[in-house]
Image (cartoon, grey):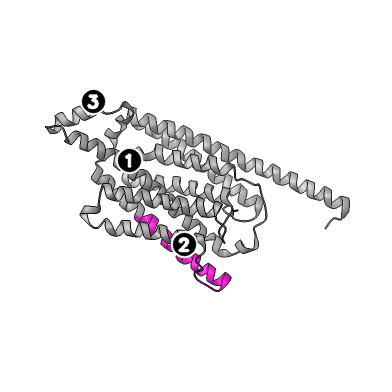
Amino acid sequence: MPQGNEYTQYNANLQATMTQHAMQYMAWYDAAVVLYALAIAGFVAYWFFRSRGVLGVGLLFTVAGLISQALSLGMRAYYSHHVPWNDLYGSLSMVSLWAVVLFLIFGARFNLWFAAPLVLACTDALLAYAKGWNKGLAPLVPSLQSPWIFIHVPIVLASYAAFLIGFATSVIYLLKKWDEDRAASVPGQSVGAAVAAAERPAWLGWLDIVPSSSRLDVISYRVIAVGEILLTAGIILGGVWAHMAWGSYWQWDPKETAALASWLIYASYLHLHTRPSWRGVRAAWWSILGFVSILFCYFGVNIWISGLHSYK
């Protein structure tokens, strides 16, 4: 190890190299933010023009943004020599990446492209917020130097991404249900639909390409079920990691407690959805409540409350 002035020069050179590397992966990160914004514009255009070509443009920008973001995370991992989701910046980036990946899967499975502007807007907002938490490259702290960080963290972050998509479909469900109820209040099916469309605010014209509210309710249920399965797996794997690290499966850490609360909310959503009286509007609001709990679990606990998972 260099000594004295040599060490000072060595440290300065190291910091300069790390800064250069950070600028490289951040260039791809910034490109992803721009590409997702262009994708949002493309999907909004699809709302109103309803052209498969316009839809293709939105998808093209989305995939380009996904590739750019993946390159950013990959370069960060390469230069830091550890996983890129070790801090708030990296984990938010990973949530955003999962949100886009899962949305492309769900979009293809359920023809969910009408929800793209809302999902991608949330994704871009997360990326914009995460940038303020980028502290550059740093060694992995000892408590995170475990193979479990490769499994537990990505699975939990994927569950958050699934819940984000479920939140988006629930919000759109409420809008669609409101639109259907307005149409139903006018006598005559065709007349009611025409009157409702005429009186609807122009910016909500895209609701015509959204499937029925009953179909949206089913889609939300399936997306949230995937999120709950992932969260369950993440909590179990986190317990195993905790047992290996500290000798206890559960320590009632604020993050663990908040995650359990979110798990219970979504578990009750899935259970109550089996009752016809709880499907539809009630289920949509319950889904939104669940996502609020996820936001608290992620931001409230990680930033404002001290604990084993805190970024303070």
| Sequence-first disc among 3 and 2 | 3
In this view, which residue lies farthest toward the bottom?
247
Q: Which residue is at the front of the view, 165 or 28?
A: 165
Name the spot of residue 206 as percent of width and height, x first: 31, 32
Q: Which residue is at the front of the view, 54 or 172?
A: 172
The residue to which callout 1 is attached is: 172
| Sequence-first disc among 2 and 1 | 1
Name the spot of residue 79 as percent of width and height, x first: 66, 50
Residue 51 visible in the picture? no
In this view, which residue lies farthest toward the left?
188
In this view, which residue lies farthest toward the front?
305
The answer to whether 142 appears left or right of 232 in the picture is: right
Question: For the point 70% across and 46% down, which residue is it?
Answer: 18
> What type is the residue that disc 1 sits on?
Ile
Contact check, label 3 and label 1, Cβ < 8 Å? no
**Cα gap from disc 3 to disc 1, whole angstroms:** 20 Å
**Cα gap from disc 3 to disc 2, whole angstroms:** 49 Å
Say how many tags the image has.
Answer: 3
The answer to whether 95 appears left or right of 55 in the picture is: right
The residue to which callout 2 is attached is: 257
Q: Is 293 in the magenta?
A: no
Q: Which stretch appears magenta?
A: 225-252
Tell me which secondary structure the magenta stretch mostly adopts: helix
Which labelled disc corresponds to residue 44? none
Question: For the point 46% across and 62% down, which residue is it?
Answer: 257
Which labelled disc corresponds to residue 198? 3
